[in-house]
Image: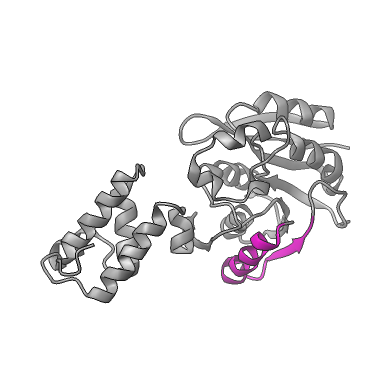
Amino acid sequence: MNNSCTVREAYDQGKNTLSRAGLQSPAFDALMLFEMAFGIGDRASLAIHGGETADPAKLEFFDELIIRRTREPLQYILGRWDFDDMALCVGEGVLVPREDTLTLVETACDWLKDKPSPRVLDLCAGSGAVGLAIARRIPSAEVTCIEKSPDALRYLRRNIEQFGQGRVLCQEGDVLLPPALRQPFDCLVSNPPYIPARDIDGLAWEVHCEPRMALDGGSDGLDFYRAICSLWKPLVRDEGLIAFEIGYDIREGVTQIMEQNGIVRIGAAKDFSGIDRCVFGTAVS
């Protein structure tokens, strides 16, 4: 970038660089990074200060951020990402929370809202987005989050410390193996890996920056649903809820697995785009 330019010119140059790189939201991304570098994060402030000469050190930092954005997810650069009014810590090694996952949270909370002191199990917890959002919305809930990845566990523990309110626990564990837990839960939720292995190479480059183990659901995308329904369902009390996030094309497969494992009254909920995003049912012995 030009070392002698105005604040507005600096922003415009960064936005144009991201636009040429083919990013979907160059103006938004540039503004988020501009706030990191210059402390200006809204268009009104940009208009007020736009004619001022850009500080060279801040300009150099902004230039570095823009270059990073052409090869890294915005969320990783920022180090935090909003989910259900929580600014969750994220970074390399953990899946970035998506708005669509609120469908799973809302499905569980609708069922939990009238339950006294419910116990919730969140499998493949990642950053803790699902479990923490449930604990925030259901003040009487106690939540246990299970995660295998050491990288993701670092973010999970930090997020629990900030947002867990003393009611969210973290345990390291492999969902594909029998659980070490024995206590019963009222509700099991999971946003597991569900992309078929053969499809991962065709995903957008930004998704490839996220951990493969958080994406790869096996040959048909259903490995984790099979393991959870067979190995972890016994931890759910009779008439308890089991709810999964799903990919757009695997509702039928997940439903069949749930039925085969004695889960009844199975239904589905759509995300904000009208796509089936959550499958849920009732556990019976």
Residue nearer the viewer, 186 or 5 = 5
Horizontal and vertical percent position of residue 17 = 28, 51
115 lies above or below 246: below
Is residue 7 a member of the stretch shown in magenta?
A: no
Horizontal and vertical percent position of residue 96 = 54, 52
| One can see residue 86 in this view | no
Quadrant of the image containing the C terminus: top right
190 lies above or below 10: above
24 lies above or below 254: below
Q: How many marks?
A: 0
Q: Quadrant of residue 35?
A: bottom left
Horizontal and vertical percent position of residue 254 = 71, 30
Quadrant of the image containing the N terminus: bottom left
Horizontal and vertical percent position of residue 70 = 39, 52
Colour scheme employed for the rendering of this structure? one colour
Is residue 172 a member of the stretch shown in magenta?
A: yes
Boundaries of the magenta span: 149-173
Residue nearer the viewer, 133 or 152 = 152
Residue nearer the viewer, 269 or 222 = 222
Q: Return the residue found at the far front.
A: 2
